[in-house]
Structures are given as C-alpha cells and as structure tokens.
Amino acid sequence: MAEGYARHLAGEQFNVLSAGTTPSEQVHPLAVQVMAEDGIDIRSQRPKGLREFLGRVPVRYLIIVCGGAQEACPRIWPGLSERLFWPFDDPAAFKGTEAETREEFRRVRDQIKSQIERWLIELRK
C-alpha cells in the first residue's frame, strides 16, 4: 500500500521501489481491494525482497514501514541520505472476521496515505 501511495502521490518526484525483509508470495487481496476504493490500482505490484535492490540501486530515502524490518533492514545503502521509520501495523496479521480485517486494512491504508502526504509537504518546505 505504501508503494502504491508513494507512486501515486510522488511518482514524478521519485523512482519508487518497495522491498521487504520477508516478502509474501503475492500482494494481499484486501490490500488491492482497499487501495482500489481510493482509486489506486496496485494489482500489478508484486512483493520483492531486499536483495533485488541492495547494492544495485542507489536509495535516497529508505522508508521502513513495519516494526520487524527496523532491525532486519540494512543500515547502509548506496546513496542513502535519510532513513525513516514509520511503523504501521501489519493488517495481514490482524485476526478477526472478514469485515473486521477489511476495516483494519482501511485503517492502515489511511494512516499510510496521511504519513506520505505529511512527509511530501515537509520535503517541499
């Protein structure tokens, strides 16, 4: 979801890449659904591991969005100027009914969107 919003809100400003320390096999269907509710199509996104980019692509801003990744994510990247930590709950780990889980995805989606919007405003100052 963060990749989708970053591309949508700042795609012209950045080459947005997303990778995880332990990527899933597919983007969660509820993530696709709740992002579509906000007009963003992430169906073509795929989970990627850090090794796909580490040492191959310079990274200006490294944004870590889950707690476990803070410790597991490498501290040094070529070209890194800022490492940001924005810990969001993992909605895929939420336990509840289908409706409750969908609401959790929406809640996290909205938090991600707000955080990226605030960050982009700060960068423009």
Image (cartoon, rainbow, N blue to C red):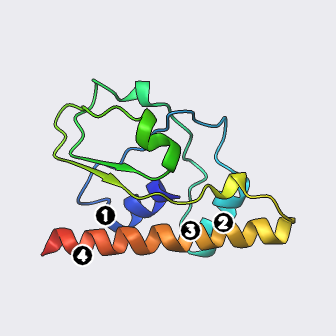
Q: Which residue is mark 4?
A: 121
Find the distance from the CA under tag 1 to the CA under tag 4: 11 Å
Q: Which residue is mark 2?
A: 105
Q: Earlier in the sequence, mark 4 or mark 2?
A: 2
Specify the amino acid type for callout 2.
Phe
Find the distance from the CA under tag 4 to the CA under tag 2: 24 Å
Q: Quadrant of the C terminus?
A: bottom left
Name the mark nearer the viewer: 1 or 3.
Answer: 3
Which residue occupies 19% across, 31% down? 78
Which residue occupies 80% across, 71% down? 100
Find the distance from the CA under tag 2 to the CA under tag 3: 6 Å
Q: Earlier in the sequence, mark 4 or mark 3?
A: 3
Q: Look at the numbered discs 2 and 3 and tell me whether their residues touch, using CB distance below 8 Å.
A: yes
Q: Which residue is mark 3?
A: 109
The answer to whether residue 125 is above or below residue 42 is below
Q: Earlier in the sequence, mark 1 or mark 3?
A: 1
11 left or right of 39 in image: left
Question: Residue 39 appears at what percent x and percent y?
Answer: 55, 73
Q: Look at the numbered discs 4 and 2 and tell me whether their residues touch, using CB distance below 8 Å.
A: no
